[in-house]
Image (cartoon, rainbow, N blue to C red):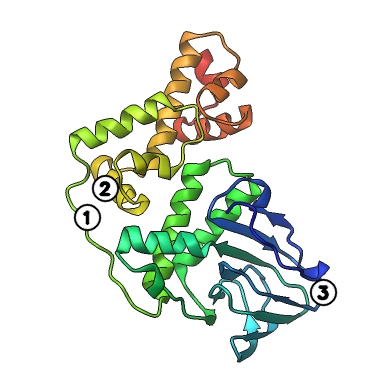
Amino acid sequence: MNNPAIPSIEADCLPRLSSQTQGWEHLLVEQFQPLREGDCYYKSDDHTVCLSLAPRPVQMLHIRGGKTYTGLYGKGDISITPAKVPFFTRWEGEDHYLQIRIAAQFMQTVARESLSISPDRLELLSEFKTRDPQIEAIGLLLLTELQQKNLGGRLYIDSLANVLAIHLIRQYATTRVQLPTYEGGLSQRQLLTILDYVHEYLERNIKLADLANQLSMSQFHFSHLFKQSLGVTPYQYLLQQRIERAKQLLKESDRSIMDIALMCGFNSHSHLSKQFRQLTGMTPKTYRAN
């Protein structure tokens, strides 16, 4: 989400961590941990999902769209506020939660391109308190990226944003829809086009849209067909190829590990080392020495 308009809020509502400085598109993800009781009011042009991270349940008052809810919110509880709906909340005691704001325009694009839904028909339902394992899982993955300053890269964030958008539309839109079925995967020519693109621009911060646009597909459609073809997600494939190039450079050149990291699309020595160790079981330095 580029330069999202942040409403005026009380100091106690300011985030502990925010993706606003990390260049994420379509999403604004923020971690909040107010240490005392307080209240907060906002109205956003984006759809908002709040995921409670509080280990101890917190007494909450929510007022949204003329409806009021009071009760305890504990770890894993989720609320959903549609775009442009005013929202007031008051809490008692220490709270901890993750707020995910997903751009309404992005949701409309996903609805049109992936589900053939007219953007004018897309409307989300309000949820005061619900449980949704898929949203919780996506939220925790986004929190990890937030804490690690987007080590996964743009392709990973784009993939999570698309999965979240599709899930919200399927489960919480006023008009229920079914996902189209994708069978057969990409054609050989389509697959080679993508593999060549990844190979040529491996050092760049490739976005999911960059790959989908090569085949004039929606991002969600492309991701499903790609996984059917290779058995891995576009992000997993990109990571594998970056590690393979790093292996080659470690064995065939005397470049520094930092230089190799940048040549392979990693943003630091430590970033390469972490991903390299996860995929190979050893550090780049150890691999070079063997």
Q: How many neighbours does mark 2 have within 10 angstroms: few (below 14), some (14-19), or many (20 or more)?
A: many
Nearer to us in this view, 73 or 267: 267
Mark 3 or mark 1, which has the lower sequence index?
3
Q: Quickly name the residue at label 3.
A: 36
- Picture quadrant where residue 101 is located: bottom right
The N terminus appears in which quarter of the rendering?
Answer: bottom right
Badge 3 vs badge 1, beta-carbon distance below 8 Å: no
User: Where residue 99 sits: x, y (%)?
Assistant: 62, 65
Taking 5 as reference, is 87 above or below it?
A: below
Q: Quickly name the residue at label 1.
A: 182
User: Where residue 250 sits: x, y (%)?
Assistant: 50, 15
Q: Quickly name the residue at label 2.
A: 225
Q: Amino acid at mark 3?
A: Arg
Residue 290, can we see it? Answer: no
- Helix, strand or loop at mark 3: loop
Mark 3 or mark 2, which has the lower sequence index?
3
Q: Amino acid at mark 1?
A: Tyr
